[in-house]
């Protein structure tokens, strides 16, 4: 059984989808911690309501000292004996100092069809480019931002009249299917990508 730490920054809808899936019989992973860089993140209360350990390491007091922030986050995750990390809407960029020791054991969901649109504002960028389709990607985390081996992708159509918000909601619905599907495989040691729908 793989012990999974989930890192969030906001509402945590992907985190909840992961918790739901890990509650299914025969799942190869179990949640050991939901942590955030924002003590007010709404997802923390949602995870606690499901009986999962929660904590926060507020990044703000650390200012520009990313290494000190990451050391505290690492200590928290180690204290919960995690085997792997799922980034689920975690909006801090992690440096190589944090990422490298977790190589092959940390995955992330990103709201674009990587390698397109690394970084922020992915939905607006897909619309501006006139893309006919958009989607989300789960990938292994490497020190390069939104890079690393692709473990799964889900596609959605871009429709006439889409705004970034409408498109984001369509993608998010697929994120909730893709991330659990990838975690189930990955936690069982299977790195073959998942393609949805
Ligand atoms: C999701 O759309 C996720 O893909 C995105 O943030 C949202 C979090 O929603 N992640 C990133 O942009 C990472 N760079 P959630 O808190 O409801 O899961």
Image: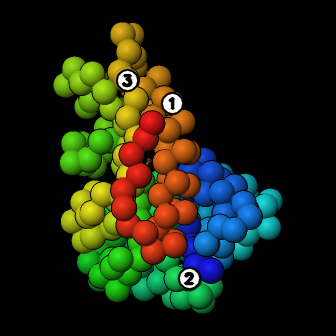
Q: Residue 133's spot in the image, x, y percent?
A: 31, 27
Ranked by sequence position, the earlier of labels 3 and 1 is 3
Q: Which residue is mark 1?
A: 169
Q: Secondary structure at mark 1?
A: helix
Residue at image mark 3: 157
State the count of labels. 3
The one nearer the camera, 105 or 194, is 194
**Residue pictured at 24% horizontal, 71% vertical:** 143
Front residue of this view, candidates 37 and 170: 170
Q: Is residue 24 left or right of residue 141?
A: right
Image position, residue 137 (x, y; %): 36, 49
Pointer 2 or 1: first along the chain: 2
Residue 53 image point, x, y percent: 71, 73
- Frontmost of labels 3 and 1 is 3
Which class describes the residues within 10 Å of circle 2: few (<14), some (14-19), or many (20+)?
some
- Proximity of marks 3 and 2: CB atoms separated by less than 8 Å: no
Q: Nearer the viewer, mark 3 or mark 2?
A: 3
Q: Position of residue 71 (x, y in %)?
A: 42, 85
Question: Please, is residue 126 above or below residue 61 in the view?
Answer: above
**Label 1, residues with CA under 10 Å away: few <14, some 14-19, many ≥20:** few
Query: Residue 191: which quarter of the image?
Result: bottom left
Mark 2: is the Cβ under 8 angstroms from ligand 1? no
Q: Are marks 3 and 1 in contact (CB under 8 Å)?
A: no
Q: Is mark 1 within 8 Å of ligand 1?
A: no
Task: Tell me which label, 3 or 2, sits earlier in the chain.
Answer: 2
Asked whether residue 43 appears in the rendered view, the answer is no
The residue pinned by badge 2 equals: 82
Report the coloring of the rendering: rainbow
Is residue 24 toward the left or the right of residue 1 in the image?
A: right
């Amino acid at each position: 059984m793989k012990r999974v730490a989930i890192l969030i920054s906001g509402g945590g809808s992907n985190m909840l989808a992961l918790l739901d899936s890990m509650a299914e019989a025969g799942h190869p992973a179990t949640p050991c911690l939901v942590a955030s860089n924002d003590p007010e993140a709404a997802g923390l209360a949602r995870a606690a309501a499901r009986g999962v350990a929660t904590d926060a390491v507020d990044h703000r007091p650390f200012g520009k000292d990313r290494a000190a922030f990451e050391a505290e986050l690492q200590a928290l995750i180690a204290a919960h004996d995690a085997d792997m990390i799922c980034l689920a809407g975690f909006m801090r960029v992690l440096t190589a100092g944090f990422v490298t020791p977790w190589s092959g054991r940390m995955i992330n969901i990103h709201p674009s069809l990587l390698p397109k649109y690394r970084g922020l504002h992915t939905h607006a960028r897909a619309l501006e480019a006139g893309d006919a389709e958009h989607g989300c990607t789960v990938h292994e985390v490497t020190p390069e931002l939104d890079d690393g081996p692709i473990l799964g992708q889900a596609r959605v159509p871009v429709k006439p009249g889409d705004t970034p918000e409408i498109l984001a909601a369509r993608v998010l619905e697929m994120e909730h299917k893709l991330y659990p599907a990838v975690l189930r495989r990955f936690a069982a040691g299977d790195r073959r990508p998942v393609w949805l729908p």
